[in-house]
Amino acid sequence: MFRGSSNFEKLLDKATSPLKLEPDWPVIIQICDQIRQGDVEPKFALSCIKKKMTNVNPHVVMFGLDVLESCVKNCGAPVHDEIGTKPFMESMRETIKTTQHENARNKLLELIQAWAHAFRNSPKYRCVQDTVNILKADGYKFPTLKESDAMFKADTAPEWADGDCCHRCRIQFSVIQRKHHCRACGQVFCHQCSSKTTNLPKYGIEKDVRVCESCFEKANKPSTT
Ligand SMILES: O=P(O)(O)O[C@@H]1[C@H](O)[C@H](OP(=O)(O)O)[C@@H](O)[C@H](O)[C@H]1O
Ligand SMILES: [Zn+2]
Ligand SMILES: [Zn+2]
């Protein structure tokens, strides 16, 4: 875990270097991949990104916002679960109130508005819309919403299901018969039914991870073309 974090921090410092003249998208994509592959905890990643918001250098702040925007768009629920919390939203409000950089303030208002729109049907992330309402009540002016900003295109691995027996052979789990999860379908299996591994590029998972028999076959069937 520690290695992943230090590697993540190096990537983030590179992506937000004040020496850069424009966003370093290849590095930003690597950062998103690290989160999507589980190489770094989303909570840790976002705490590092948040620190960039308070940097004295406006370039660092703006590049940090580019990283934040990309992670929210590309990493799915693990990141949404972090930003859609009251503490995170409060820290964003604090940044909007205290930052010396007008561009950063406007970019953050734009992002929070886009997230509120994207999460409009998710009560779980209600505090994002609440934050927009509070900021409006505080007199902040939001830019016109661009629908495209609120489209999260990421195809992310499904959340893990729970169960007391194997999804495929129905054997009951016990102290001996341990549970395992397929990273492709998210279902719970015994070891015998999920002993294979494969990468899942469609979910941004480049390394081999545990999958069930049927997901292994699907991921490795010869293409018909
Ligand atoms: O070994 P355990 O103590 O039962 O814990 C299980 C392992 O962590 C499994 O990881 P894996 O899928 O990578 O095997 C995970 O899928 C299960 O949900 C956990 O219950
Ligand atoms: Zn089984
Ligand atoms: Zn599966």
Image (spheres, grey):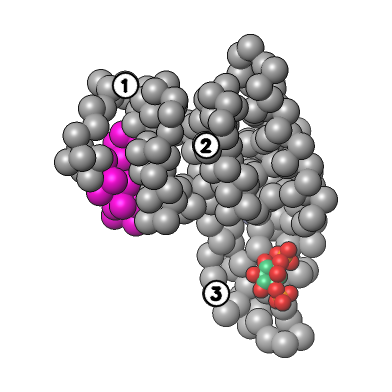
Task: Find the magenta span and give its range.
Answer: 112-132
Secondary element under disc 1, as helix, strand or loop, is loop
Q: Amino acid at mark 2?
A: Met
| Amino acid type shown at disc 3 | Gly
Return the disc, 3 or 1, that comes first in the chain's sequence. 1
Residue 65, given in percent of the width and then of the height, sits at 51, 30
Front position among marks 2 and 1: 2
- What separation in Å lies between label 2 and label 1 (alpha carbons)? 23 Å
Residue at mark 2: 53
The residue where tag 1 is placed is 146
- Between marks 2 and 3, how big is the CA–CA gap? 41 Å
The location of residue 218, given as percent across then percent down, is: 67, 43
Q: Position of residue 115 (x, y in %)?
A: 36, 38
Q: Quadrant of the C terminus?
A: top right
The residue that appears at 43% across and 48% down in the rendered structure is: 91
For marks 3 and 1, give the CA distance. Answer: 41 Å
Please indicate whether residue 210 sits to the left or right of residue 89 in the image: right
Q: Is residue 1 above or below residue 166?
A: above
Q: Main secondary structure of the magenta part?
A: helix
Q: Quadrant of residue 93?
A: top left
Residue placed under numbered mark 3 in the picture: 163
Relative image position of residue 166 (x, y in whole percent): 63, 72
